[in-house]
Image (cartoon, rainbow, N blue to C red):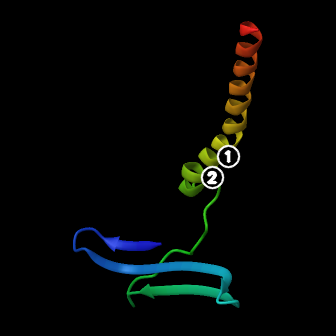
Amino acid sequence: MIALDSSTGLVKGLHFRGWAQGSCNNLAVDLVLDYHYELSSYSLPRFHYGTFPQSPYLLLTIIPSVFIVLLVPLLLYIRKRKRKQEVNVEA
């Protein structure tokens, strides 16, 4: 979340969170980051993660990915079926 004064270009407040888990050189890594900055005269709104209709991440990445994953097997099946019909026609 970022609050920016568009008339002056001044950043009034900035808040972001991030986390990652994994391993590096056979060591378990767990990283959590919470960065909060705001001017003393400004109060950022409460931080929230968003909901399904408001979250562009879901709409722009997850939904098309699921569509592609479901579409590829269907296209492969149709292609295989056409090849099988072509072999039967030639024989």
Is the residue marked by circle 1 packed among few (<14), some (14-19), or many (20+) residues within 10 Å? Answer: few
Number of marks in picture:
2
The residue sitting at the front extreme is 91
- Counting from the top left corner in percent of width and height, residue 91 is at 76, 8
The residue singled out by tag 1 in the image is 66
Tell me which residue sits at (36%, 80%) in the image. Answer: 12
1 and 2 marks in contact (CB < 8 Å): yes
| On screen, residue 45 above or below 33 | above
Which numbered tag is attached to residue 34?
none
Q: Nearer the viewer, residue 87 or 33?
A: 87
Q: Which of 85 and 53 is in front in this view?
A: 85
Q: Which amino acid does label 1 sit on?
A: Val
- 84 relative to 36 in the view: left or right: right
- Quarter occupied by residue 3: bottom left
- Counting from the top left corner in percent of width and height, residue 75 is at 67, 31
- 21 relative to 8 in the view: left or right: right
Tell me which residue sits at (22%, 69%) in the image. Answer: 7
The residue singled out by tag 2 in the image is 62
- Counting from the top left corner in percent of width and height, residue 25 is at 64, 90
The residue sitting at the left extreme is 8
| On screen, residue 6 above or below 54 | below
Q: Nearer the viewer, residue 3 or 78?
A: 78
| On screen, residue 23 above or below 66 | below
> In what element is the residue under mark 1?
helix
Tell me which residue sits at (62%, 86%) in the image. Answer: 32
> In what element is the residue under mark 2?
helix
| On screen, residue 5 above or below 88 | below
User: How far apart are labels 1 and 2 at the CA level?
Assistant: 6 Å
- Counting from the top left corner in percent of width and height, residue 2 is at 42, 73
Tell me which residue sits at (74%, 29%) in the image. Answer: 77
Q: Which amino acid does label 2 sit on?
A: Ile
Is the residue marked by circle 2 packed among few (<14), some (14-19), or many (20+) residues within 10 Å? Answer: few
